[in-house]
Amino acid sequence: MTITRLQSHPSSDGAGVRIRRIHGFRENELDPFLMLDEIRSEDGSDYAAGFPSHPHRGFETITYMRQGQLEHQDHMGNRGVISSGGAQWMTAGRGVIHSEMPLQQDG
């Protein structure tokens, strides 16, 4: 069995949210459609602007919250809050416009 250790690198997404991209579209030893990001900061200014309305089409997203809260909304009127230990799975299908916004300002 081969174990590969992937190093994350600083990046940003959404409205300037500071993330660590663990795997993206650069090094494609893994599935080319897999992207792994981590948001971890005690400084609310690193993530408070969130991910305002943006489109997705033809893929799945999974959000897992270790700590904090994130509100998801989409153009079809769906809304939900993901809290510590929770997860949200979204199928974009033919297309969805959605947002993911943090509900806390610190930590």
Image (cartoon, rainbow, N blue to C red):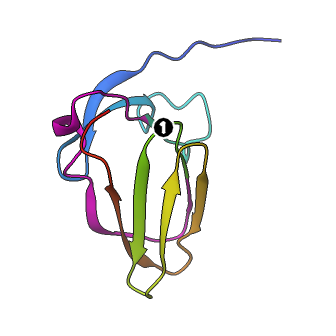
Please determine whether, in this image, residue 32 is positioned above or below residue 75: above
| Residue 39 forms part of the magenta stretch | yes
Q: Residues within 10 Å of mark 1 (few under 14, many from 20)?
A: few
Q: The N terminus appears in which quarter of the rendering?
A: top right
Amino acid at pointer 1? Gln
- Say left or right for 52 vs 76: left
In which quadrant of the rendered view does residue 17 lie? top left
Q: Nearer the viewer, residue 58 or 78?
A: 78
Image location (x, y in percent) of residue 97: 37, 76
Q: Which residue is mark 1?
A: 67
Q: Which percent across, then down, holds residue 39? A: 37, 35
Q: Residue at x 51, y 56 (%)?
A: 82
**Magenta range:** 38-62
Foreground pick, 8 / 52:
52
Q: Residue at x 21, y 35 (%)?
A: 46
Looking at the image, residue 84 sits to the left or right of residue 12; the answer is right
Of helix, strand and loop, which one carries label 1? loop
